[in-house]
Amino acid sequence: MPYKILIVEDDELLCISLKRLFQKEAYDVTAVYSAESALIALNNEPFDLIITDIVLPGIDGIELLSRVKEKYPDTIVIVMTSYATIETAIRAFRLGSYDYIIKPVIHEELKLLVRKALTQIALADSDSKTKKLSSQIKYDYSNIVGKHPFIKTIIQEIKMIANSRSNVLILGETGTGKELIARAIHYNSDRALFPFIAINCGAIPEHLLESELFGHVKGAFTGAIHSKKGLFEEANRGTIFLDEIADLNLHLQVKLLRVLDDREIRPIGSLQSKKIDVRIIAATNIDLHSAVKEGKFREDLYYRLKVITLKLPPLRERGGDIELLAKHFLEKFSKELDKPVKTISEEALSILKKYPWPGNIRELQNIIERAVLLCETNTIEAKHLPDEIKNLEEDIIEETSLPLSIEEFTKRMILKYQSKYSEQELASMLGITRKALWEKRKRWGILKK
């Protein structure tokens, strides 16, 4: 992808001449005759480098430099002027210009300066490629552990959709690996060099979430002492993962719908919108179709998000994968914690296989990490597993001979252990957030003990 250069020069002949010069160098060049036009161009698409005259009609080059560095701090700016005063040069440098060139412009000198400036981006790209390789290894399809047919089907679907621009909706209970799948899609796509940004929509207070997603300008509200980029702008050219999308209030759902329709955002307090190129992957652990019927989620947004839908099965439906995942996490944490733990005893495996895993893969991962920490030999034994896991089978047999739904099981776990464990410990044991625990208690009328 060629570097994108914006030339801002009110002298029409010089402007056209510079545009042709850099087009011959195989750059993607846009040329405008005023700072106002430059700001519009910047709002519509990102540029790697700007070459601007100091003296311009209306907004001058120094003011343009200031605005560019405030909104697009990573963009390189080179300024040109016929007035070679040291004061102007110092002011430009203080505002963040890369360098300063005096008119009349010598083409070879300017070309050399641009090449030197873009070397910074090339070095950053090299670093990004290294990070991409590392992330591709970490989120390679082979790292999606499981032999269940559902998992094999999901991997095939990811391979087919990775390079599309379509929105993706991932459905599944808490802890089933929705973010892992989202990252696999991103890091195996042509967006992998650009950011992957994840946000839990239920973890940020509603009054802060809009600013977090879309940004704000200085003075937009009390406390907004600086302009701030939103996560959508930070994710430009990459992917944004909106976890727990159902927790968005209706106001933000409307704003998100506009982003999907118009591919642009408007920071709080700004009068201008900004074009963005972001792929949206959303996830939820609730039935969005029911939420639409109940008026809690917009129907039009639901259909815009579910262009491609991936449904992840809960761990209790992936019987054969429990042992596979347990051994995968054993290997992972043995290396990370530098412990010589190599195997899991048959008794411990039997207990793990009988447990219904309300917290799914995340809960299994936490339990194996704990077991590796506690293990003093090379084998995880039943004694290294939490009491609630070991005692669960006999508890359930005592209470009922009928099979339990996951909701009923979770309810019984809360009732049985809420007096023994803290809210955070109980939530972690169930593989859910404290907020989700509170919501379940409220729904079932369980009083806190």
Image (spheres, rainbow, N blue to C red):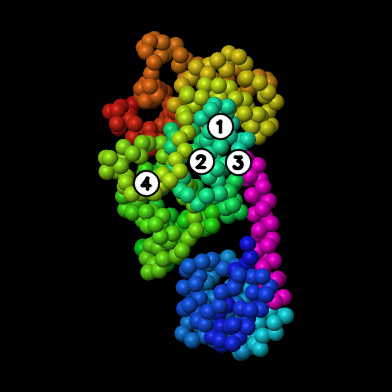
Q: Secondary structure at mark 3?
A: loop
Kindly indicate the quadrant of the structure image that contains residue 152: top right
| Residue that badge 4 annotates | 303
Seen from the viewer's position, the closer of residues 71 and 138 is 138
- Whichever of labels 3 and 2 marks the residue nearer the N terminus, that label is 3
The residue at the far front in this view is: 160
| Residue that badge 2 annotates | 179
| Residue that badge 1 annotates | 152
Q: Nearer the viewer, mark 2 or mark 4?
A: 4
- Whichever of labels 4 and 3 marks the residue nearer the N terminus, that label is 3
Q: Where is residue 126 shown, x and y percent of the image?
A: 69, 57
Distance from the alpha carbon under mark 1 to that under mark 4: 26 Å
Distance from the alpha carbon under mark 1 to that under mark 2: 17 Å
Q: Nearer the viewer, mark 4 or mark 3?
A: 4
Q: Which amino acid is tagged 3?
A: Tyr
- Whichever of labels 1 and 2 marks the residue nearer the N terminus, that label is 1
Quarter of the image for the N terminus: give it. Answer: bottom right
Residue 243 shown left or right of residue 119 in the figure: left
Q: Which amino acid is tagged 2?
A: Glu
Q: Is residue 232 in sight in this rendering?
A: yes
